[in-house]
Image (tube, grey):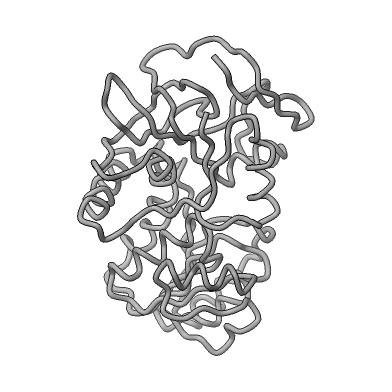
């Protein structure tokens, strides 16, 4: 079967590889996540042994069932199954490939709070960003979003944000929750925006590593920082992650959320697909279709 194989130096090539062992998903679409970019750049905290087939999230078929699934080696025609959920009848495979990671990541900060009246979603035009916007509206919150260009801000508005801003326009906002996939200076500048008992969810560092806030500052402002690392949570609290996935699936079936796919690429354009995320030119979820 064909797969996108990562080798030393970040080189990717479409190669013939052995069939996966165990339970197997016939892959119709594979979601690309920032973790795939980090692995390719040798920056992921738990680097796999090379050569390696990227991709941990797919949508496809198992014995005729249409599923969204976590897998090993998803940038391929078939992948080894970790666990799966059935797709709603109306869902497309690209939407399924953009569901689990983005929505679970965005959902965790909301699930840990008793209420959220207002939320600021950074990178609101991205996969996690559009998911977080939709979930904020499900919560009944006023949702603000940031994005770097007029086109991306319009995309975030279309996803459901109440108001959108450039990153240099947020200093006067005050919110209960910040969802931040950007990190770096954006994270630091977002801390003073928190209302008392507010929280900032540190999800990613596409814009650079975090500058740690002092405990004294957090105590003085009645604020908190929440780290979100889905992979570790799945390892240590799998039942909780499964429950969250079922709750999200119910929202999708009821039409309250809808995964936003911004671009699809064939497998042999995997370099281009990864570059769109690394260079932050994409909007919505980026998906491969093997």
| Residue 198 shows in the view | no
For the point 59% across and 30% down, the residue is 267
Above/below status of 67 relative to 101: above
For the point 27% across and 52% down, the residue is 252
Q: Position of residue 123 (x, y in %)?
A: 56, 65
Quadrant for the N terminus in the image: top right
- The image quadrant that residue 274 belongs to is top right
Q: Position of residue 206 (x, y in %)?
A: 64, 56
For the point 32% across and 33% down, the residue is 67
| Residue 106 shows in the view | yes
**Left or right position of 146 against 160:** right
For the point 35% across and 69% down, the residue is 136
- The image quadrant that residue 207 belongs to is bottom right
Q: Nearer the viewer, residue 99 or 289?
A: 289
Q: Position of residue 7 (x, y in %)?
A: 72, 24
**Left or right position of 40 against 262:** right
- The image quadrant that residue 246 belongs to is top left
């Amino acid at each position: 079967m064909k797969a996108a194989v990562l080798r030393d130096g970040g080189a990717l090539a479409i190669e013939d590889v052995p069939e996966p062992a165990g339970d197997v998903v016939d892959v119709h679409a594979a979601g690309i996540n920032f973790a795939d970019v980090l692995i390719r750049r040798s920056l992921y905290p738990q680097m796999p042994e090379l050569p390696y087939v990227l991709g941990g999230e797919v949508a496809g078929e198992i014995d005729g069932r249409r599923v969204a699934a976590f897998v090993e080696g998803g940038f391929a025609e078939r992948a080894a199954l970790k666990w799966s959920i059935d797709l709603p009848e109306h869902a497309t495979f690209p939407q399924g490939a953009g569901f689990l990671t983005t929505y679970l990541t965005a959902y965790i900060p909301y699930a840990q709070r008793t209420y959220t009246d207002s939320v600021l979603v950074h990178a609101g035009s991205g996969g996690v960003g559009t998911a977080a916007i939709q979930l904020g509206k499900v919560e009944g919150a006023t949702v603000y979003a940031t994005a770097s260009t007029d086109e991306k801000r319009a995309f975030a508005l279309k996803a459901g944000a109440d108001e959108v801003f450039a990153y240099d326009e947020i200093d006067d906002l005050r919110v209960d929750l910040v969802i931040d996939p950007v990190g770096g200076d954006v994270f630091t500048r977002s801390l003073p925006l928190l209302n008392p008992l507010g929280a900032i969810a540190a999800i990613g560092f596409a814009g650079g590593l975090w500058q740690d806030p002092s405990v004294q500052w957090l105590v003085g402002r009645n604020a908190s920082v929440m780290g979100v690392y889905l992979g570790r949570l799945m390892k240590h609290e799998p039942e909780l992650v499964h429950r969250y996935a079922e709750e999200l699936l119910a929202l999708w079936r009821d039409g309250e959320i809808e995964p936003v796919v911004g671009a699809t690429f064939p497998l042999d354009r995997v370099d281009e697909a990864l570059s769109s995320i690394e260079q932050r030119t994409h909007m919505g979820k980026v998906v491969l279709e093997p």
